[in-house]
Image: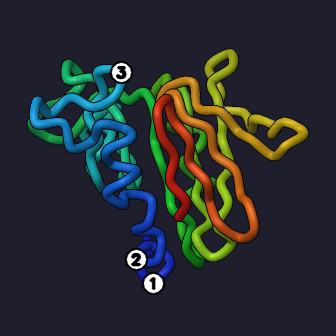
Amino acid sequence: MGRGTAHGSAAGWATPDVRRGLLLDDPSGRGQRGLVALYETGLYRASRDYRVPDMVFVRREHLSDRGVEGAELVLEIRSPRDETYDKIDFYGRMAVAEMIVVHPEERRVELFRAVGGRLVPVQSGPDGVLGSEVLGITLRTVDGKLEITWDGGSATV
């Protein structure tokens, strides 16, 4: 899986404003809604059956010595020839509640939500807004920028 400039250019996802809004810098180590955010950490089903999302939001009880054994939300950052869409079925089998796919060059996202053991695309509303129930945020592209809004704040990346 290639790590290139597309991943680096999407670093805006974790700007200080976004981190504060999602409480990712909370000294207790617990972010918004009791979740811990980890970067490039293995999500394991069995010893040799795992995937590595770019970012994963988990409950503390899902942490293990080898990575994480369950997740509430995974975030994948698209880059040329990556495996983002190949991972969707795996994440569905792992009971991941939501998956956000970030398209850094276009400053847009896709949201998938668990329905009947599968992750299916969520359609945006008429105003282009997608809402993550797991993180309690809304996402939309406005004038070529990704706008992230949460209770009490927002950031544009």
Mark 1: few/some/many CA within 10 Å (<14, 14-19, 20+): few
**Callout 3 amino acid:** Arg
Picture disc at residue 5: 1
Look at the numbered discs 2 and 1 and tell me whether their residues touch, using CB distance below 8 Å. Answer: yes
Residue at numbered disc 3 = 33
Earlier in the chain: of badge 2 and badge 3, it is 2
Taking depth in this image into account, of 46 and 35 the one nearest to the observer is 35
Residue at the (67%, 60%) spot, across then down: 108
Mark 3: few/some/many CA within 10 Å (<14, 14-19, 20+): few
| Left or right: 119, with 90 as reference point | right
Question: x%, y% of residue 92?
Answer: 56, 30
Mark 2: few/some/many CA within 10 Å (<14, 14-19, 20+): few
Question: x%, y% of residue 11?
Answer: 40, 68
Taking depth in this image into account, of 22 and 82 the one nearest to the observer is 22
Look at the numbered discs 2 and 3 and tell me whether their residues touch, using CB distance below 8 Å. Answer: no
| Left or right: 79, with 62 as reference point | right
On the image, which quarter does residue 139 sit in? top right
Q: Secondary structure at mark 1?
A: helix
Residue at numbered disc 2 = 8
**How far separated are the C-alphas under marks 2 and 3?**
27 Å
In the picture as drawn, the residue positioned furthest to the right comes out as 126
Residue at the (37%, 38%) spot, across then down: 22
Q: Is residue 70 visible?
A: yes
Residue at the (62%, 20%) spot, across then down: 117
Earlier in the chain: of badge 3 and badge 1, it is 1
Q: Secondary structure at mark 3?
A: helix
- Whether 133 is drawn above or below 21: the answer is above
Taking depth in this image into account, of 101 and 148 the one nearest to the observer is 148
In the picture as drawn, the residue positioned furthest to the bottom comes out as 5
Question: x%, y% of residue 111?
Answer: 66, 41
